[in-house]
Structure formats: C-alpha cells, structure tokens
Image (cartoon, rainbow, N blue to C red):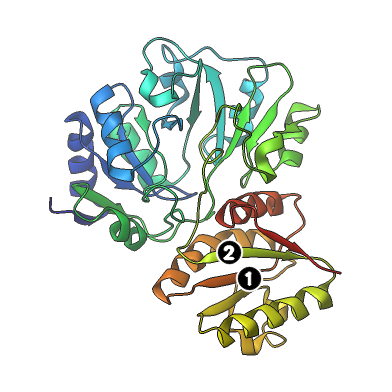
Amino acid sequence: MLTKVMDASSTEAIALASRLFKQGELVGFPTETVYGLGANALDRDAVLSIFAAKGRPADNPLIVHIWHRDQLEGLCDIPEGAEPLMKAFWPGPLTLLFPRTERIPDEVTAGLPTVAIRMPSMPCTRVLLRECGLPIAAPSANRSGRPSPTTAAHVLEDMNGRIPLILDGGECQVGLESTVLDLTHGQPVVLRPGGITKEMLEGVLGREVALAGSILRPLKPDEKALSPGMRYRHYAPKGSVTLVEGPEEAVLREMRSRCREDREQGKRSCVLCFTEHLEALSDCDPHDIGSAADQRQVAHRLFDILRKLDQEGMETIYSEVLPPEGVGLAVMNRLGRAAAFRTLRVQ
C-alpha cells in the first residue's frame, strides 16, 4: 500500500481524508496532544483494522473524537459533572468516560460499558471531523508499545505501507496524550494523566478528584484496562530504560557510574537529563528533556527524544525523574511505562 502524506490544512487533503473515513479506511491525523490513527467509530471492520495496523491488543479501549457536543447524542449518556468539564476544557486535551449506547461497537470499548470521548482543539483536526461528520475512533498513530508520534514523520516511520494517508499538521503542541477522567462511578477518577491536571479538574468540579492506583504501577493480573495506556509496556524505545530517583547529587553520580560501566561492557548508553544538568553529565551522552522547572516543556519533548534514542541505537538509557504532581504526573506515567517501572532509588 502506498502511504501518501499531505498538508493537513489543505482542502484537498481534508476532502480525501473524509472520503477515506467514509469508505472504512484509516487515516493518520494530527491533534494538539499526539497524532491519531483514525477510523469511523461506528464501523466495526474499520475499527478492527486499527488494531491490525498497530499490532494493538484488542482488550485496549479506544478514544472517540468528535468536533461538536451534539454528536454525543445517541452515543452515550452524560453523567453528573460532565457538563462543567466540557464547558471548561472542550475543545482540548481532556477525554471523558461516558456510559455508552449500543451504537458504539464493542470493538471500540474493549467490551466495557463505557466509551471514552474527547473533542480535539487543533483547528485542522476540527475541520476534518466536521467535514466527515463521523465520530472517529483513534488511538495514537504508532506501532503498539512504541513512543507516541508527535510529528507526521513519526507516523510515517511506523505506518508507512499500512495506511493510505497521513495528514501533516506539524509538531503537536502538548506532546502527551489526553487526560482520561472517569465520571461514571460517583467520585471522579483520573485513569490517565495528561495536560489537564488533577488540580485543574478539581478547580472546575469543586471537589476531590482521585487518581487511579495504576498510574504509577503496572495493572494487576485481575485489573481491567479502563483507559488506553494502562495495561501494557507503552511509549518504549528499543533500549532498556531505567529511572533514577533520589537526591540530586546522588542521582547524577549514579547515572555517570552506570553509563561508564555499560560502556566498558561495549553497550551504547546515554542519559535523559534536565537542562540544568547537561554540563554535569557531559560525558554520558546527555539528551536534554527540558528544564526541571518547566514540566510542560519536558512533556512536549519526551516522545520525540525517546524516538531519537532508537535512531541512535541506544541500548541502555538512564533518566532523571520529575515529582509526580501537576503535568509531572503525566510525564512520570509515560516514563514509568517506557521503563516497565524499572527504578533505581539512590541515597
């Protein structure tokens, strides 16, 4: 299959993508979070083709993308608390779980009674969703387990020959997937953290928002994946990632020591570090993930850097950590899964 890449802002590209969606085909498209791999959410066969293209396990639910609130009618029921959140954060990087109707195929929800829905804010994406008039089911447009794509080039790297079209909308603004919030069981629960933080949600709802216990650990064998990005090793480069946490000087010392030992064994090794520590780690092939004081900068850079590690053939990677609060929680959720939660705690 020939994979065409077209400018997402062009009328011709939007028309072609809309036509492909209606024909049951897949399209890679940009959003403000990451690039999505979309199909008509009401077409079972089209949805199944997403799993085939990604190599994605079928028990991992998908997110449905809409351009207007009216599209919720007939797809789901609206739980208490959803209205003020939609008003505050839609369009934007917030996914809400709703009780679904029978119109939503089981293939979209992994058989769960809820459906995850969001309204992207990226202008070209909203034009596309309006033009096709369909709810679009879309996980991130990468091969399953790989770092999510934040540029069209990333999508092409993983999906070339697997899908007919990729819309190039440039670099994604946020760089991490949307926050996923469950409102269907009384207390609101963040299932996957993102750019809309726990504190921002609580500010709108005026009550406590809980965090799913699996955000910073693997799911237990008997736990269901209620949201994308919960069950499997995700966001991972080919090399082995290890998180290093503890006092600053101890972390820097440990990372230098580990890199030196790995290189003595003939391995390609590097560190992911904050801008402030580039000089201190200059002999460890440092990769600048942004300032420790700017969590959103780290979030924006993370997936692009994880992909570059594969291009460089890195075999062992040691990463600094952020406090798991605010957007830092989302960063640590992604880094934790990229590392399969392998962590060194130093003193």
Q: Indicate the position of residue 123 as horizontal and vertical percent values.
A: 41, 46
Task: Point out the residue furthest to the left here.
Answer: 1
Q: Indicate the position of residue 53 as horizontal and vertical percent values.
A: 28, 43
State whether residue 338 is above or below residue 25.
below
The amino acid on which the numbered mark 1 sits, given as a three-letter code, is Tyr
User: Which is nearer the eye, 84 or 245?
Assistant: 245
Task: Point out the residue furthest to the front here.
Answer: 265
Question: Can I make out residue 187 in this image?
Answer: yes
Q: Is residue 222 left or right of residue 309?
A: right
Q: Is mark 1 on a helix, strand or loop?
A: strand
Specify the quadrant that holds the C terminus: bottom right
State whether residue 105 is above or below residue 231.
above
User: Which is nearer the eye, 261 or 70?
Assistant: 261
Q: What element carries label 2?
A: strand
The amino acid on which the numbered mark 2 sits, given as a three-letter code, is Val
State the residue at coordinates (44%, 65%). Answer: 307
User: Which is nearer the eye, 78 or 264?
Assistant: 264
- Residue behind mark 2: 241
Confirm or deny contact between disc 1 and disc 2 (CB under 8 A): yes
How far apart, in angstroms, are the residues tagged by discs 1 and 2?
A: 6 Å
Which of the 4 quarters of the picture holds residue 84? top right
Q: Indicate the position of residue 65 as horizontal and vertical percent values.
A: 42, 32
- Residue behind mark 1: 318
Q: In this view, does 138 lie to the left or right of 321?
A: left
Q: In this view, does 240 lie to the left or right of 4?
A: right
Question: Can I make out residue 9 in this image?
Answer: no
State the residue at coordinates (52%, 55%). Answer: 175
